[in-house]
Amino acid sequence: MEDLPRIKSLLTQPQNIVILSHRNPDGDAIGSSLGWLHYLIQKGHKVHIIFPSEYPINFSWMPLADEIIIYDLRPERAKELLAVASLICCLDFSALDRIDKMGELVRNSTATKLMIDHHIDPEPFVDLMISDPQSSATSELILDMIIAMGDEKYIHPGLAECLYTGILTDTGNFAHSVSPSILRKAARLLE
């Protein structure tokens, strides 16, 4: 988490933030994005989530999921938000082709770009990066970041449900990518 001090410093001032995740978002893409959204809103930032395509309806119960903007359905609104963003957070993907048409918009944006991801071989298109292929999920990295920044007090039940969902789905209900530390973290989210 080499860039964490710079990220923490950046987040001390109100930002206009857009959170992006990949096409055909899965539980971790949705959970990490919504968990990060809940955290950033509590810190006083203006935040929007944009996904390239729709997410599975079985995740619509998640707190604030109805706020997610789908680029395929509302491209002009998505472009407007990206144009005024001061910070673009790229969650659960490590290559711009994973966000389709938005990739070029992100590449050309003057906003600070932050990647939070657990996949291997991230593309160097961002200014700040939290990347750990040993993590079971991007949701785990979000949890680790919040705790490392000393902001555990912001982990309310809705935020915890989002991150737990991301961890649960990316580990296949704890069937793979499981370590004692991820089990302790997941149990902590259930408290």
Image (cartoon, rainbow, N blue to C red):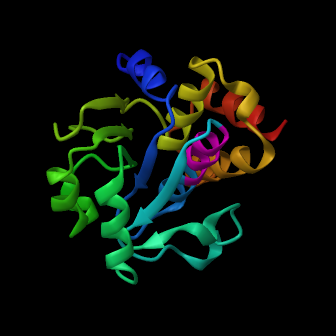
Query: Residue 29: horizontal and vertical position, in percent?
Result: 47, 56
Would you say 149 lies left or right of 160 here?
left
Is 42 situated left or right of 141 in this image? right
User: At which x and y percent is residue 138?
Assistant: 47, 42
Which residue is at the front of the view, 76 or 20? 76
Depth check: 182 or 41 in front?
Answer: 41
Provide the residue span drawn in magenta: 34-42
Q: In this view, does 126 lie above or below 3?
A: below
Is residue 103 inside the magenta stretch? Answer: no
Check residue 40 for magenta coloring: yes
Quadrant location of residue 178?
top right
Q: How many labels does the image show?
A: 0
Q: Is residue 88 above or below residue 135?
A: below
Residue, x 75% and y 51% (percent of image)?
158
Q: Residue at x 15, y 60 (%)?
A: 104
Q: Which residue is drawn at 32% across and 77% down?
A: 76
Residue at image location 62% in from the left, 66% down from the top: 65
Residue 71 visible to the viewer: no
Locate residue 182, reporting x and y percent: 61, 31
The answer to whether residue 41 is left or right of residue 145 is right
Q: Quadrant of the C terminus?
A: top right
Query: Which is nearer the eye, 13 or 65?
Result: 13
Q: Residue furthest right?
A: 191
Q: Judge from the rendering whether residue 154 lies leftward or rightward of residue 177; answer left or right.
A: right
Specify the farthest residue to the bottom.
73
Q: In which quarter of the image is residue 146?
A: top right
| Picture quarter with the N terminus | top left
Q: Evaluate whether residue 184 shows in this view.
A: yes
Question: Is most of the magenta stretch helix, strand or loop?
Answer: helix
